[in-house]
Image (tube, helix red, strand yellow):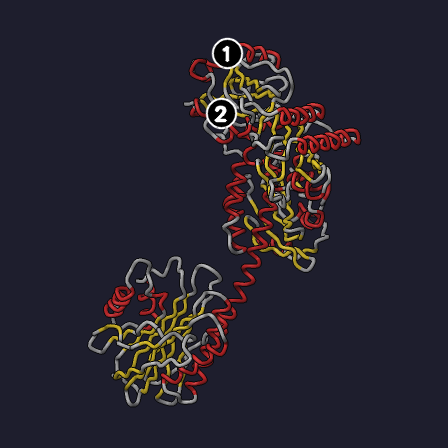
Amino acid sequence: MSAAGEPAADTDARDAAFAETVRRTGAAVGALYLLDPDGRTLSLDVLCGVPADIAAPWATVPAGAPAPVADAVRENRVVWVAGQHELARTYPRTAMVLPYPLVLAAAPVTGVRRWGALLLMWPATRPPYMTPRERGHITASCGRLARLIEESGGPGTDRAGRAVERPRVLPLGTGHRAVGPVMAAADLLERLPGGACALDLEGRFTYLSAGACDLLGREAGELLGTLPWQSLRWLDDPACEDRYRAAVITREPVVFTACRPPDDWLDFHLFPDASGISVRIVPRGTRIPGSPDPGHGTPPAPARAGRLYQLTHLAAALTEVVGVQDVVDLIADQIMPAFGAQSLVLSSAEAGRLRITGHRGYDPHTIERLDGLPLDTRLTPAGRALSTGVPAFMADREEMRRLYPEATLISGKQAWAFLPLIASGRPVGCCILSYDRPHPFPAEDRAVLTSLAGLIAQALDRARLFDTKHDLAHGLQQALLPRVLPPVTGLEVAARYLPATRGMDIGGDFYDLIPLGDTVVAAVIGDVQGHDTAAAALMGQVRTAVHAHAALGAAPDRVLAGANRLLIDLGTDLFTSCLYAHLDLARRHVTLASAGHPPPLARRPDGGTGPLDVPPGPLLGIDPGAVFPVTEIPLPPGLLLAFYTDGLVEVPGVDLDDSIAALAARLAHAGDRELDGLIDTLLGGSGTDGRRTDDIALLLLRHTARS
């Protein structure tokens, strides 16, 4: 900006060239994006045809993003998108913020280097192709813009190096009249076969007729200069603002219906041009020449949220799914109702066949016939949609019968949407929404569903990978833990393992019971740091080392010392706690040693319960010369020992000693029930039935009189 607050002359020249390019191409909207100095982001520099707040969602575009302007810069070519369907298929992210029928072109602005890109948008009524003359004009205009950018000192500055305003919003044409109430009314009469009200491109009322005031229930003085969805609370619905945005961006007439309380339904017919929007407000069902048919076959429902907001909500939900079943549930619970579908089939592409991974609303016999069909089957359009990447929408059975005569014999469905799921250029699967009655698919719904298909594909691809890893991890976990505890005469035993609910449902907690003779047994419990496959693998090595040293008859402290040497030799950065107990049932005593593990609980025959005083040595894997103190206690008949990992007692904000004392109290009051039921009581009282941030292992031993 100059000292007087006006753009410098060289910036004026650049803006004038930009505005002239937009005007001569007949575009409704134009935007000039320039690369930031680091080359990572394209930022909106100049805009015309829409207000800045409408362009806010696409004011910055990462240079590496799959977007038309980014592709134009990276590939140094003109990107042409012939319509909404092509935009949704080729650039689903862009379609999320521009869910409107339009045609667009993005051209690189290149001189001594690549400066940015010019974006032009036309109404969908223009021819869906670009003539060589148009292409040449746009290319030449981009070259001129590049020269003016270089002469002005580069993007974001004038020739003197002073910062200029970004983005600058320019009028689309030249010589436009200032829009006051009188002139707005004149514009309204030029645009409409009648009068109601007028909005400027910012969405504010600039004129209201007496009839409009009567229908809206407010005086003109209360509404002029305000936004309808702010001054009229019953229009405060995202759908209303979204229809206004659609009219501004596409320059096409738009109609929507809203209810003025308590039950006056009104049709709003919007007629846009470059200076504003004329709005005709009439009672529901009144035909307006030149306006789209609002389609009032049935009484209208309250206005739904705009598709853009709906898509954003569903996209956010898809980022939270974890497994394949989560994807199926989300589609069934949210996407199906949003688009009025009654049934769903989600299939994945595996070895040239469509394998059904989830479904709703189909009987098992139909699913059995559809599962495993080859991709080139004529029984359903799913394979063709997946191989071509083009969605297929069948509004009724007749349309399906013409192309796939066998498909309608399988089920009683009446309409279908076949959405190919493509992730990173790879076919992932196909999502099929079906309807019990004929169902038209408006262009807006097709575009949103096509965009959603890309998001579903990414979510499904992640979910399949997670499920594969989860199955692998679960199999590893089960292989490393004892499948059953060996029977020991004179000893009742029970154990339980619960993985953390966050992550891969796998961890490093372990337990074991090792018979060492007819009346001698070793019990061990441990916790390897972490909740992943590395922790589980190390847990298997520690358990094997403990088992091997115990089988050789080593004392408890020597067993832990041997496991400690193993971990140090492995050079792992994961530490392990471990508690080892040697039980001699004939001599009726227990010898224990601990490597940084929580103390076991003991419930004596007289009911007295509490943690045992077992001085811990250091965690395994830290000190090669570590010493592990040994503790001996008597083992009378009826003594119950509880070994556990810290996931059972560690509670944020609660002292560990208090948690252990609370666990001991639950054990004391649980009675002499069978051990599996006792485990349920201990786990249930610890709040472990919800989300767990750590694994839990629990091993109970009770000495009986039979020894």
Which image quadrant is residue 107 in? top right
Quarter of the image with the C terminus in it: bottom left
**Residue 81, image x, y percentages:** 69, 36
Crowd around label 1: few <14 · some 14–19 · many ≥20 (10 Å): some
Residue drawn at the location 47% of the way across and 66% of the way down:
506
Q: Nearer the viewer, residue 82 or 181?
A: 181
Is residue 613 visible in the rendered image? The answer is: yes
Cα separation between marks 1 and 2: 19 Å
Is residue 247 visible in the rendered image? The answer is: no
Q: Nearer the viewer, residue 600 or 406?
A: 600
Residue labelled with disc 1: 209
Residue drawn at the location 46% of the way across and 65% of the way down:
531
Question: Relative to residue 191, is residue 584 drawn left or right?
Answer: left
Amino acid type at mark 1: Ser
Q: Nearer the viewer, residue 250 or 35?
A: 35
Residue drawn at the location 35% of the way across and 85% of the way down:
489
Instruction: Indicate the secondary structure of the residue bearing disc 2.
Output: strand
Which image quadrant is residue 466 in? bottom right
For the view shown, which residue lies furthest in the front direction? 160
Q: Nearer the viewer, residue 349 or 65?
A: 65
Q: Earlier in the sequence, mark 1 or mark 2?
A: 1
Residue labelled with disc 2: 258
Which image quadrant is residue 594 in? bottom left
In this view, 453 is above or below 151: below
Amino acid type at mark 2: Ala
**Residue 76, image x, y percentages:** 72, 41
Question: Relative to residue 215, is residue 388 drawn left or right?
Answer: right
**Residue 528, image x, y percentages:** 43, 71
